Image (spheres, grey):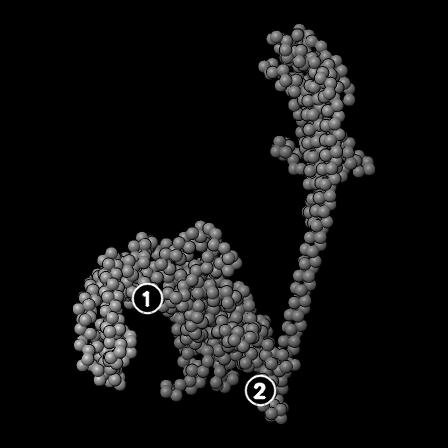
Amino acid sequence: MNFTSAGLLEFDALKALVGRYVSSPAGHAELDKVHPQSDRAAVEEVLGETAEAIAYHVASTQTQTTQRGAAVRLHFDGLPDVAQHVAKLQIGGVSLEGLEIREIVSILDRASEIRATLLATGGRYPRLSARASRIAEFRPLLKELSGKIEPDGTVSDHASVALHRIRRDIERQQRSIQESLEKFMRSHRDEGILQDEYVTFRNDRFVLPVVAGQRRKVDGIIHAASGTGHTLFIEPLETVGLNNDLVRLREQEMREVYRILADITDHLRKAATDIAAAVEVLGELELSFAKADFAADYYCVIPKFSPVSAPRLSVKNARHPLLAAVFRRQRKSVIPLNLTLEPDTRILLISGPNTGGKTVALKTVGLFALMAQSGLPVPADEAELPLFEEVLADIGDQQSIEQSLSTFSAHITRVREIVAHHGPHSLVLLDELGRATDPDEGGALGVAVVDRLRRAGSFALASTHLLQPKIYGASTPGVLNGSMSFDEETLAPTYVLRTGVPGASAGLHIAQRLGLPLDLIEQARSRLSTAQQDLGHFLKLLEERLNAATKLEQEVAALKRSLEQEKATLAAQWEKREAAKLRELERRTEEVLQQFESRANQTIDRIAESGEQKKFTAQSLRRVAQTKRELREEVASTLSATQRNPDQPAKPPLQEGMRVKLRGIREPARIRRLLQNGAIEVEAGFLKLQIDADEVIEVLPETPESAKLPKGISLHTAPRGEMSFRELNVIGRRAEEATDEVDKFLDSAALASVTRTRIVHGHGKGILKHAIADLLKKHPLVEKFYDATPQEGGTGATIVELREP
């Protein structure tokens, strides 16, 4: 691996830009480890975690809720540097200070919170969850240490029973001393020996401020004097014993505090390995989310790596991140870069005006390669890159007086290193190839170098002003010319890269724009050879035509977008109108159904007033429900047919033998004949109908049985279940069940055009026979009925003859 050109491509500056989103020392330590690598699996794993962090960042900014499963914003700011504290835990017998313990506890508390948050995401961010799972479970340890160390690092009164008792004793002793000194001040108030009436503290003992000239009037110990010498701080003899007791209590307090800190340190020492791992994981997670913040601010995407068998370099709307950062402060925007190099075209020669953006284009591609292989998102709309083993660059003037290197010799020295190390998995960036020497010799040298790269299969971008490389790019397979465009009206570059044609250097135009005297510019133009003028004119003409073609392409694309938008608008309007029509149809249908049901119920109620008609009333109710259900089904079928999208293909022309679906009829039908005036004759099970062709709502595929038959042979089945409409066996049924089945059976038989049926009810006690006879007497479809012949079952069956339709 050779990424020594990272310095020329300002990779460290890029890391510093990302570092603005890192706050903790652990995060910065992880950022320092970021470097390009050529292990595809490792890089893709890092990019995958970065992609999850970006997705989490988006989800956390879009929701303000903390419901279960929601993405809660993670915070890494304010994390202290505990590296030295953790190192002290590795040393036996060493106790941590209270503030050091407090900082470790705060780290563990934040680590536990982040761990719980990421593990609760339900597997939506598997890489982040897996990294968070490396944080140990610290909640038992945190619970044990809870409340023992105050925020300022002091040990809490409640850290132990003994410490609480000692501090209460100290408070009582301090009050006793205070009361004794106040009593002393009251008794000597009028003697003029006190400088002021207040109690203060010197050498850990309570004292009083006494006028220096009156010290002999106060029996006590002098502990200090003021800066002027006018005041002495004296401990009266009355409080010496009390102060001694206080000092002894404070020593007990210190010993207990030290014991508590040592005990807490021992607990933390047992978890030292887990604590160190947690700190490292926090740094790794913070770096991942720093990348996500960087991606959000600079509109980055996760780069993809092209297959090894078909390497491809393509960036869409790419922006150099450092340039974008500078322009952001100036409230400007970067002109994006678009280019594509395919497996069979790996060399791009960029020409065009000075200060036109050629070097920025090279640096952008090179920096993108380093960022992608470092697991960093890139500021672009799309980015696909090969996985390079080397990124080799010669950018800028590296002349050195100290090393006796001229511009040309420094250039050649770097080119020599590139030629020595390049290969099929290299990205080579050459700025101003063949510069700083005779143009003819420099051009020839540049062509030789580029051709060596082409034959090796390297991806390369080179900028040039020389003629020979431009001609080479136009005439050599695998090499692509490109140019940074130039605005002739403003005499300024546009910073837009166009591929396919070389560009003019426009040096005189740039010099004029930069302020050289006009007469000097005109004199220079007069010295140009005819060939140079012709070439410049030719390149200018090419660029004008390319601009015209690009403009036309943009207009066509805009027109296409407009047509697609208009089409979508019309489709939406059509759907809206059809939806309104369907809602109105549904409303009217529901009104008709309600009116029908109301009138039917009124009629049935009148019939039900007669006691002997109760059974016929129940039958009527069933028929009302059946008719209502059939009407609803027919309306639903009609609605389904009218809801067909206008973009769906029309049904094919109807032909004899086709299986079709008819409006309002569930069973598939087959077309028997095509009649005149758009009518057709169909057979639907046992029904034969002549209907309008518009009643066909769908042409159905052939049944599997028909599909298996030889060509020219068709299958026509008999009316489905015809025997079931000629005979019904109700033996074993209760009378009510039997009459219901007979009623439905007679309806089906009539629809099947059956005129004679047999109902088998058996002998028994005659209950079924009499109940069926009562039904048949009043049934509107029955012409007559009688006992069956002995051959058909005798009195155990009833023959029913139905009315003709």
The quadrant the N terminus occupies is bottom left
| Residue visible at 78% across and 31% down in the picture | 690
Q: Earlier in the sequence, mark 1 or mark 2?
A: 1
Q: Quadrant of residue 785?
A: top right
Q: Is residue 651 above or below residue 88?
A: above
Mark 1, other Cα within 10 Å: few <14 / some 14–19 / many ≥20: few
Is label 1 in a helix, a strand or a loop?
loop
Is 736 displayed left or right of 157 in the figure?
right
The quadrant the C terminus occupies is top right
| Residue visible at 36% across and 68% down in the picture | 25
Residue named by callout 1: 152
Name of the residue lying farthest toward the front = 190
Name the residue type under label 2: Leu
Residue 633 screen position, x and y as percent:
69, 34
Mark 2, other Cα within 10 Å: few <14 / some 14–19 / many ≥20: few
Residue named by callout 2: 514
Q: In this rendering, which labeled residue sits more in front, label 1 or label 2?
A: 1
Name of the residue lying farthest toward the top = 790
Whether residue 798 can be seen here: yes
Name of the residue lying farthest toward the right = 677
Whether residue 452 can be seen here: no
Is label 2 in a helix, a strand or a loop?
loop
Q: Which mark is residue 144?
A: none
Name the residue type under label 1: Asp
Q: Is residue 205 above or below residue 708?
A: below
Residue 522 screen position, x and y as percent:
63, 91
| Residue visible at 64% across and 73% down in the picture | 547
